[in-house]
Image: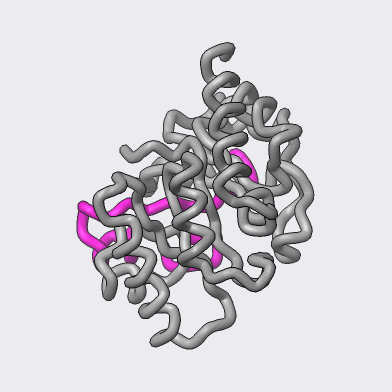
């Protein structure tokens, strides 16, 4: 299993006019350990081209590329994994397409979602949303740290918390039971994505040492 401790989710709407490739390059230099490419509003060819460019950028770094929702794009570019939501393709159907070698992550909004993801063969769970967030407007109510702890007690899969996480609360999320944190605006909208990633990586390491 790759290191999911600092998981970047891209969003070009929040990038302050900078390219996704530039943000990813800076963030990886700063310590990001996993990159999920999320594109909700671009055409398939554009998504594939961007995914291929990020894949090439990550080559040799050991940082995996995860594609949000789109198994076809993940397969087209040889991505390391795909991340699916509760209304996306079922894990069994996704696995038939991807084969055993591709990571499949599942978003879980409650204990039942996480239990089902584990039973159906997901590789990791995205616990979402931990805190309320303006980045996504279609999410369930925030789980809070108690919700994270409940999911941690229920499943043994790696957990990645997402939703409203930044330097001020990242350590709490790790201590509540997450193996990693996924961030969007905390890096994508930061004036210096490399420095923002470095700061978060330091916070995560310290929290893991104390937990």
* Residue 25 x/y as whole percent: 45, 56
Question: Which percent across, then down, holds residue 191?
Answer: 69, 54
Q: Residue 203 occupies which quadrant of the picture?
A: top right
Seen at 45% across and 54% down, the residue is: 35
73 with respect to 190 (left or right): left
Q: The N terminus lies in which quarter of the figure?
A: top left
Q: In terms of depth relative to the viewer, which is nearer, 162 or 37? A: 37
- Whether residue 135 is visible, yes or no, is yes
Q: Position of residue 150 (x, y in %)?
A: 63, 29
Query: Position of 98 compared to 6: left or right?
Result: left
Q: Is residue 110 left or right of residue 89?
A: right
The quadrant in which the C terminus is found is top right
Q: Residue at x 75, y 36 (%)?
A: 144
Query: In percent of the image, x 75 and y 44: which residue is there?
Result: 131
Q: Is residue 30 above or below residue 149?
A: below
Q: Is residue 178 above or below residue 114?
A: above
Within the magenta stretch, is there residue 141?
no
What residue lies at 57% left-to-right and 42% top-to-bottom?
197
- The residue nearer to you, when weighing 200 against 87, is 200
- Range shown magenta: 84-113
Q: What count of labels does the image hold? A: 0
Residue at the outermost top position: 210
Is residue 85 visible in the rendered image? The answer is no
Q: Quadrant of residue 87?
A: bottom right
Q: Would residue 107 be counted in the magenta stretch?
A: yes
**Residue 46 versus residue 112 in the image, above or below:** below
Q: How is the image coloured?
A: one colour
Residue 95: x and y in percent read: 28, 60
């Amino acid at each position: 299993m790759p290191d999911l401790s600092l998981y970047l989710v891209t969003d070009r709407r929040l990038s302050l006019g900078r390219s996704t490739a530039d943000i990813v390059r800076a963030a990886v230099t700063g310590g990001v350990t996993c990159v999920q490419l999320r594109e909700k509003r671009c055409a398939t060819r554009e998504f594939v081209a961007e995914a291929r460019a990020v894949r090439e950028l990550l080559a040799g770094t050991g940082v995996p590329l995860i594609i949000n929702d789109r198994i076809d794009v993940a397969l087209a570019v040889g991505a390391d994994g795909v991340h699916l939501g509760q209304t996306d393709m079922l894990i069994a159907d996704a696995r038939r397409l991807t084969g055993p070698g591709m990571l499949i992550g599942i978003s879980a909004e409650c204990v039942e979602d996480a239990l089902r993801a584990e039973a159906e063969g997901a590789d990791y769970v995205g616990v979402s949303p931990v805190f309320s967030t303006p980045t996504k407007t279609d999410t369930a109510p925030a789980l809070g740290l108690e919700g994270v702890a409940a999911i941690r007690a229920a499943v043994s899969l790696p957990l990645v918390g997402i939703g409203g996480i930044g330097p001020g609360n990242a350590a709490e999320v790790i201590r509540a039971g997450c193996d990693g944190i996924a961030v969007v605006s905390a890096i994508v909208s930061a004036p210096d994505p490399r420095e923002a990633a470095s700061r978060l990586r330091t916070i995560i390491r310290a929290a893991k040492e104390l937990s």
